[in-house]
Amino acid sequence: MAPPPLSFPPDLAAPLTPYLPSPGSPSRRRPHVTLSFATSLDSAISLRPGTQTILSGPESKAMTHHLRSLHSAILVGAGTAVADDPGLNCRIGGCTSQPRPLVLDPNARWGVGSSSKVVMLAAAGQGLGPYIVVRKGAAVPEERRRVVEGVGGK
């Protein structure tokens, strides 16, 4: 089900290391935020609304998963969740812990279900269940809630 594991060469990771959290360090008690994004030359995120557009190559994808291996969570918005159906896990070979997917979805528009990548990966033990942040009073269908909670999400 999951794509093959990725690897990120240590010589490419070395320049990033001073700026990233290290597992077990005292700074792990405080939040550490790393912004990672891709955009096209014209600053568009996708070719058209609601469609996935591949903007980065294999080296960038491996670096993104290396960053995920060092963080406790991955934050995306509802637009990304709807358009991309992301897995939001770490695919670096030998990764010993997975980051928690966090989805900001104030209006509960992401139709997360049992066929969503993030849910399937969590069910297979290759990721964690997502925490979905909605606004107070948002109408969240009970089936979505059951699916998310069934894989350890909220």
Image (spheres, rainbow, N blue to C red):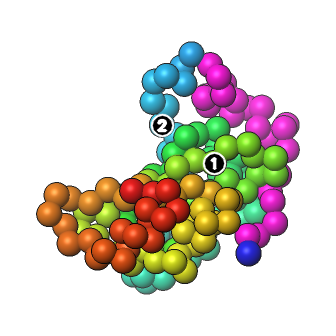
Q: At label 2, which amino acid type do we have?
A: Val
Q: Nearer the viewer, mark 2 or mark 1?
A: 1
Question: Is residue 29 positioned above or below 100 on the image?
Answer: above
Please state the extent of the stretch shown in magenta in the rendering.
2-25
Q: Which residue is mark 1?
A: 98
Residue 96 horizontal side relative to residue 47, left or right:
right
The residue located at (57%, 60%) in the rendering is: 88
| Res 44 seen here | no
Q: Quadrant of residue 81?
A: bottom left
Q: At label 1, which amino acid type do we have?
A: Gln
Question: Is residue 63 positioned above or below 106 on the image?
Answer: above
Residue 154 horizontal side relative to residue 51, left or right:
left
Element type at mark 2:
loop
Gap between marks 2 and 1 measured at Cα: 16 Å
- Give the image location of residue 142, x and y in percent: 30, 74
Question: Is residue 150 positioned above or below 35 on the image?
Answer: below
The residue located at (42%, 81%) in the rendering is: 50
> Of label 2 and label 1, which has the lower sequence position?
2
Q: Which residue is mark 2?
A: 33
Q: Are marks 2 and 1 in contact (CB under 8 Å)?
A: no
- Give the image location of residue 72, x and y in percent: 55, 40
Outermost residue to the left: 137
The residue located at (36%, 77%) in the rendering is: 143
| Res 88 seen here | yes
- Give the image location of residue 84, x and y in percent: 51, 74
- Give the image location of residue 152, x and y in percent: 49, 56
